[in-house]
Image (spheres, helix red, strand yellow):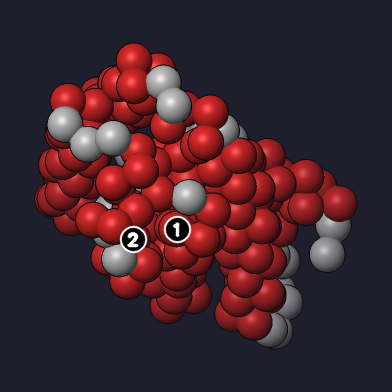
Amino acid sequence: MSINFLLTALIVAAAPGTGVLFVMSTGLSAGRSASVAAAFGCMLGIAPHLAAAMLGITAVLHASVIAFTAIKIAGIAYLLFMARQALRRAAALPVSAVAASHSKASILRSGIVVSLLNPKMYVFFLALLPPFVAPDDGGMTLRIAERGGLFMVMVLVIFIGYGCAAAQMRSFVSRRRRATTWINRFFAAGFVAISIKLALADR
């Protein structure tokens, strides 16, 4: 496995985006264990994208305007839903009450949906994996699985780091209602910004 692939996968996994915002928001509002559940959810949500890449479905979705647009619209809708949830926390819920209102299972499911409804993940697997897998390699499907699996592990480790870092700030923020409000507004604005970027993106 080449160092170029490892560096590329590391950069993509660590780049701030929807998953990072979700995990950090969860860590800040619900604590460390909740952020770990969010990270696991985001990682598990990548599995269908990897499976699609292995089966060749990714290329079909990339070529289909209707399929890509449908997934993109669903992703935008979910991002706006998360922005609304963040604004509700800013307006009503103190940080200390959020952990009780969200079970680990619901956080895990939300993380899965965050990754699953990100249409750029299909493009990511279409663009990232093929250059690092030789077409004449008899085990091409296995190579894609290996590299995709490694990427998922990178995402999990990095997202747990992001979530735990945010959770470290939780006690500080919980004592400052005004800071809690503005931080949740920041996350809401981040979700909206990503949804706009996604809406303007083509394949």
Identity, as a three-letter code, of the amino acid under mark 1: Ala
- What residue would you read off at disc 1? 34
Please tell me whether residue 48 is drawn above or below residue 35 in the rendered image.
below
Tell me the CA gap for discs 1 and 2: 7 Å
Does 144 appear above or below 73? below
Residue 125 visible in image: no
Q: Position of residue 70 (x, y in %)?
A: 14, 50
Against 114, residue 49 (above or below) is below
| Residue 21 image point, x, y percent | 43, 37
The structure residue drawn at horizontal position 71% and vertical position 46%, both measured from the top left corner, is: 10
- 200 left or right, relative to 122: left
Mark 2 surroundings within 10 Å by alpha-carbon count, few (fewer than 14), some (14 through 19), many (20 or more): many
Q: Residue at x 56, y 33 (%)?
A: 169
Q: Nearer the viewer, mark 1 or mark 2?
A: 1
Residue in the picture at 23% in, 56% down: 101
Task: State the image coordinates of residue 144 (x, y, percent, origin top left).
Answer: 61, 71
Residue at (49% x, 75% y) in the render: 54
The residue indicated by pointer 2 is 107
Q: Residue furthest right?
A: 3
Where's the C terminus, which quadrant? top left
**Residue 15: x %, y % from top left:** 58, 35
Question: Mark 2 and mark 1 in contact (Cβ < 8 Å)?
Answer: yes
Helix, strand or loop for disc 2 = helix
Instruction: Report the front residue among 152 and 110.
Output: 110
Query: In the current view of this chain or complex, which residue is farthest to the front?
Result: 175
| Amino acid carrying mark 2 in the image | Ile
Alpha-carbon neighbours of circle 1 within 10 Å: few (<14), some, or many (≥20)?
A: many
Precedes in sequence: disc 1 or disc 2: 1
- Asked if residue 48 lies left or right of residue 64, the reply is right
Residue 140 falls left or right of residue 41: right
Q: Quadrant of residue 177?
A: top left
Give the structural element (helix, strand or loop) at label 1: helix
